[in-house]
Amino acid sequence: MSVNKQLQMVADWERRKEQKMATDYQLAQQNVTDNQNKLTGLEQYRVNYLKEGIRKGQLGIAGKNFGQHQSFVGKIDAACEQQTKQVSNALVVAEQRKTQWLAQQRKRKAVEMLLAKQALKIQQRQDKAEQQMLDELALQKFIRSK
C-alpha cells in the first residue's frame, strides 16, 4: 500500500474522529442548556411559591401551614443548589469536550497538510518527468531535422 493511500486512510479516520468529538461537544452544550433551563424553572417556581406564601400570610396563614411552607421552601432551595452543581458539572464537561474537539481538529489539519505536501511532491515529480520527456522529444526532433 502506498504512503499516500495510508495517509488518506489516516486522514479519513481523523476526520471521523473529529466529527464524533464535535457531536459529543454539541451534546454537552445541549446538556448545559437543559440543566440551566431546569435551574431557571426551579428558581422561578421558588419565587412564585414565596409570593404565594406572602399573599397567604397577608390573609392570615395558620402557624402549622407557615411551618410547612418554610419547610417546602427549604426543599426547593436544596433542589436549586443541587441543580446549580449539575450546571457547573455540565459546564466543565462541555469545556473538556470542546478542548478535545479542538485538539482533534488540529490533528486532522496536520494530517491533511501532510497529505497536501505529498500530493505536491507527486505533482512536482510528474511535472519534472513530463518536462524531461518533452525536452527529449524536442532534442530528437532537432537531431532529425539536421
Image (cartoon, grey):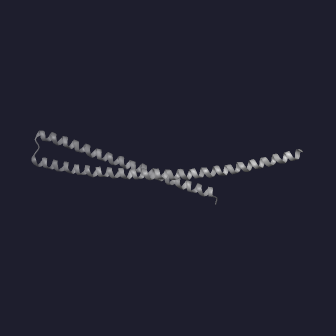
Quadrant including the N terminus: bottom right
Q: Is residue 89 left or right of residue 66?
A: right
Residue at 78%, 47% (x, y): give it: 135
Q: Nearer the viewer, residue 121 or 88?
A: 121
Q: What is the x, y in percent for residue 25? A: 42, 50
Above/below status of 60 relative to 123:
above
> What is the quadrant of residue 45 in the picture?
top left
As drawn, the residue found furthest toward the right would be: 146
Residue at 88%, 47% (x, y): give it: 144
Q: Nearer the viewer, residue 94 or 76?
A: 94
Q: Nearer the viewer, residue 46 or 115?
A: 115
Q: Is residue 82 left or right of residue 59?
A: right
Residue at 86%, 47% (x, y): give it: 143
Residue at 54%, 56% (x, y): give it: 13
Q: What is the x, y in percent for residue 59? A: 12, 39
Number of residue marks:
0
Q: What is the x, y in percent for residue 39? A: 29, 47
Q: What is the x, y in percent for residue 30? A: 39, 48
Quadrant including the C terminus: top right
Q: Is residue 79 left or right of residue 141?
A: left
Above/below status of 37 relative to 1:
above
